[in-house]
Amino acid sequence: MEVEAARFIGAGLMFGLAAIGAGVGAGVLSSKLIESIARQPELEDQLRPTYFLGIGLVDAVPMISVGLAFYVLFVA
Amino acid sequence: MASESSGRTFQEYLEHHLQNLVYGPLPAGHERKLYSKGEDEATKEAYCQEKNLDYDGEKYCKETLTEDGWYLANNKTDVEAMGFWAFHIDTMFFSVLLGGIFLFIFSGAARSFSLDKPTKLQLFVEMMIDFINGVVKGTFKAAQNSLIAPMALTIFFWVLLMNVMDLVPVDLIPYPAEVLGIPYLKVVPTTDLNLTAALALSVFILYLFYSVKSKGFIGFIKSISLHPFGPWMLPANLFIEIIDLIAKPLSLALRLYGNLYAGEMIFLLIAGMVSINLTSFAGLGLNLAGITLSLIWAIFHILIVVLQAFIFMMLTVVYMNMAHEKFEQH
């Protein structure tokens, strides 16, 4: 039963840390985007694709962590 | 489709959906196990006898192989025994099929090209080509190479089509296939690490090829050995640059695989939660909850699916740009 408990703790840690990381990353990115657009509104069209690229890169690692956490929780 | 309808527990349902259809060599003496179907022991035993196999008294039909040969894997122990030469047929089939669909649509639009009366398909294809062209022109500035934009277009649409398979309901294709006798089927090729690693490896080989081509072999060696700290710190330079080099295909492959695998996993968890029992009130409620959750996740997943295809293409173009840069002493 101890292995089972360790599995739940591990999965919980993975979920939580992934959420913290993704939250901080996406927050910093979005705030900088808004700052930039407020400063130079004409650059919005150029900034948006780069922003989405950044969001995708930020999003990827926590999503991997969440997927692995589900794997640990239900399959392994 | 819930787990109960196929006589599996939730865990078995998940494992079943996360297993590829594998074809590979098995040695003589290997014991194969086949999941037996039926409500009680008698029907399970009859199911095994119908296939000329022994019944182990619990869940499986057993068979010991008398000679080497190529077989479809029945479960994980088979896959482990196959080792290196295990082919994931479903991944290969669906990736080639989707690549074919992409080529068919785009070449069809190119063949029926008309300047006066453009069809909607032609306009769509032109729009996409303009989009990719703009991205490549904005990113790829180190040299002239007319192969990069077509490659970016192919990568983007191929990966996008493979990712879009994730939005197909999880049991829509595997369940009829199982009824028809295909034991496992994974319809999203990008949830297989083998495919994403193969894609990333191809990009990596192109990166090495163009690096050597534009810098020369000596220049390439110089670029990985003299770069950050100058010639006096050669081992440290090599160490850093080689890690940097290997991290490229690794991150490319794992990013795509991880995102799609996690997405598929969540779809499976939602599907596994849903009960097929429509008569009871609780069953009905669970079904409604499952449909709502699937819908929400699918709508969110549209973003991820397109974004990951875009990022894969974008990073490929960025790496190609890095490969084409001439060696400079910093």
Image: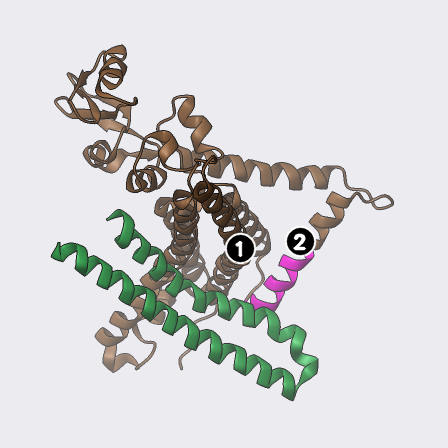
Chain colours: A green, B brown
For the point 26% across and 54% down, which residue is it?
A: A72
Q: Is residue B162 visible?
A: yes
Other residues around mark 1 within 10 Å, as few (<14) / some (14–19) / many (≥20): few
For the point 42% across and 56% down, which residue is it?
A: B259
Magenta segment includes B30: no
Span highlighted in magenta in the image: B129-142
For the point 61% across and 72% down, which residue is it?
A: A48
User: Which amino acid lies under the numbered mark 2 shown in the image of this protein?
Assistant: Met
Q: Main secondary structure of the magenta part?
A: helix
Residue placed under numbered mark 2 in the picture: B128
Observer-nearest of B273 and A49: B273
Other residues around mark 2 within 10 Å, as few (<14) / some (14–19) / many (≥20): some
Q: Residue furthest bottom?
A: A39
Chain holding disc 1: B
Measure how far apart labels 2 and 1 are at the Cα level: 27 Å
User: Which amino acid lies under the numbered mark 1 shown in the image of this protein?
Assistant: Ile
Q: Residue furthest front?
A: B281
Residue placed under numbered mark 1 in the picture: B296
- First in sequence: mark 2 or mark 1? 2
Magenta segment includes B134: yes
